[in-house]
Image: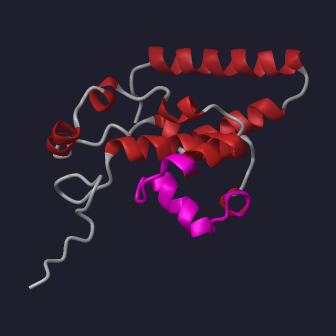
Amino acid sequence: MVKNTRGRGRGRTANGKPNPVDIHVGARVRLRRTLLGMSQEKLGEAIGLTFQQVQKYERGANRVGASRLYDLSRVLEVPVSFFFDDMPDEISSKSVHERREMSESPDPFDNDPMNRRETLELVRAYYRITDPNQRKKVFELVKSMGAIAAAEPDQK
């Protein structure tokens, strides 16, 4: 009898979820692609993939091989190390076995504001402001609004 192991193969956690390292790498691909204003389709064309395959990489559903990672770094104009930058210690310090056990705990990427589309769109819009003085004023405005919101008690 052949046992169905789909979703629990190499690189998957014990419960079949994508490996947290693959999720992080995918999030970094999405971050850089979005900051460049590049669509999934354009990125796919540049490296010989469909946009659906790019989506799977960005979600961590598919693992990115070494040669593909190299291609992505060239097209997205970043060093290969970029994809591993800012990796949380709880992921980078764990062995494969420990990462699988960790899968029962909440996913640290779910609530990270850096992984939200809104954040990426805000950063892209910010860098479209060509006048450095205007951009600095927008930056200061957003910082001051954030400080005010943090100082006020929740008003729901």
Q: Is residue 9 above or below residue 109?
A: below
**113 and 138: which one is in front?**
113
Q: Magenta stretch: dominant SS?
A: helix
Between 98 and 74, the residue placed more toward the observer is: 74
Q: Quadrant of the N terminus?
A: bottom left
Which residue does the image show at 18% across and 40% down from the upper left? 102
Q: What residue sits 57% from the left and 51% below the top?
A: 68
On-image quarter of the C terminus: top left
Q: How far from the left and from the top, in percent, is residue 116?
A: 52, 43
x%, y% of residue 153?
39, 21
- Looking at the picture, how far across and down is residue 74, in whole percent? 70, 42
Instruction: Reply above or below: 75 against 144.
Output: below
Residue 51 in the magenta stretch? The answer is: yes
Q: Is residue 59 magenta?
A: yes
At 54% from the left edge and 16% from the top edge, which residue is drawn? 148
**12 relative to 92, above or below:** below
Q: Is residue 93 visible?
A: yes
Instruction: Return the x and y of residue 35 as percentages of the image width and height.
Output: 69, 40
Q: Which of the 4 quarters of the picture holds residue 103?
A: top left
What is the span of residues highlighted in magenta in the rendered image? Answer: 45-67
Residue furthest left in the image: 1
